[in-house]
Amino acid sequence: MIKTKICDLIGIEYPIFQGGMAWTATGELAAAVSEAGGLGIIGAGQAPADWLRQEIHKIKKVTGKPYGVNVMLMSPFVDDVMQVIVEERVPVITTGAGNPGKYIPMLKEVGTKIIPVVASVALAKRLEKAGVDALIAEGMESGGHIGEISTLPLVPQVVDAVSIPIVAAGGIYDGRGMVAALALGAEGVQMGTRFMCAEECTISPKVKEMILKAKDRDTVITGRSTGHPVRCLGNKLTREFEQLEKTGTAPDVLEKMGAGKLRLAMVEGDTQNGSVMSGQIAGAVHKIEPAADIVQDVMRGAERELARLSQRFGR
Ligand code: TUI
């Protein structure tokens, strides 16, 4: 049985987080993952607070198990979103794309566990001092907004720099990845791309199909020149974006061009003009299956892999 500190901290059966992806991780997906024993996380993204409340209520109808909300700190609605989290007594929040420091006191007051995503050792240390409960160390293999360091070098450096539990993210999709993360000192894993292909994920079937067809080298990073690098599957939009970046287009023009493109892909299913954020592991995802099967496959695979390693190299 693989039970870790992160399981005890938040009261989950398996140390698997489903990434709280904007316009992708709705109440339906998060409820299925939580009910299966992992941590389902709603992606609040840039959605208004009312939308979040409705998704939280969907989860509460399906399961009494712990769940989370991911707060995208660049959202214009971030203050209202935090207010809903406090009012609804959300058990866990994860944060992305910034420093959640100023919200920590109000969340602690209601007992919400705070688990920010970090892409560097410096921010990890600062947030530990500010009193967060755990951290997700996310490598640049991930989809969406990313840092500059890969999972393999990032996780052990963060693990060694702080004493709170670390969840590894970026490039993980099966039991082998979980065992690798545990070997690096992580207490759990977060997976996004594989859960995009869960049956319960409500994104457009066209996006799921694009992930299923993707190969190892099909993602690209755009937006480096704006200071907000984003990993997506390459398409018409990324080619146009790359061209504009090459010719020195101003960051604010590029930012404007990116606005609304994630929704266009995930909700409207426009996989050529929309932003199909996905991790490098897309090339390994080959089927659409229930979220519970994903959770079970990762856990069984990890146990099998530990047994294999111990048989091969143990005494
Ligand atoms: O947040 C993510 N991934 C995301 S957010 C998102 S929504 C979006 N929409 C339009 C444009 C851009 C994003 C899609 N994917 N992952 C967590 C993450 N956070 N990765 C890296 C970071 C990060 C980066 C810099 C966290 C903190 C940071 O610096 C903060 C500081 O103050 O030092």
Image (tube, rainbow, N blue to C red):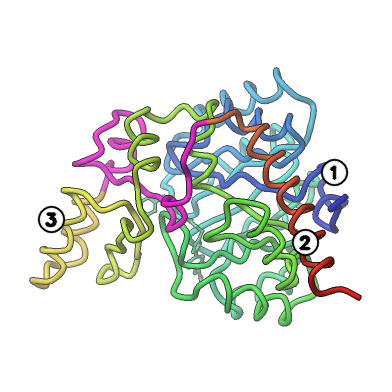
The residue nearer to you, when weighing 290 against 133, is: 290
Above or below, 99 against 69 in this view is below
User: Which residue matches tag 3?
Assistant: 240
The residue positioned farthest toward the top in the image shown: 61
What segment is highlighted magenta in the picture?
259-288
Work out how far the residue at label 1 is from the one at label 2, CA to CA, in angstroms: 29 Å
Task: Identify residue type, mark 3.
Answer: Glu
Viewed as shown, does residue 27 lie left or right of 165? left
Provide the residue designation for mark 1. 11
Which mark is drawn over residue 236?
Answer: none
Asked if the residues shown at circle 3 and circle 1 are in contact, with their CB atoms under 8 angstroms apart, the answer is no
Sequence-wise, which precedes: disc 3 or disc 1?
1
Image coords of residue 67 (percent x, y): 71, 37
Q: Please tell me whether mark 2 sits on a helix, a strand or a loop.
A: helix
Residue located farthest toward the right when viewing the structure as drawn: 315
28 lies above or below 90: above
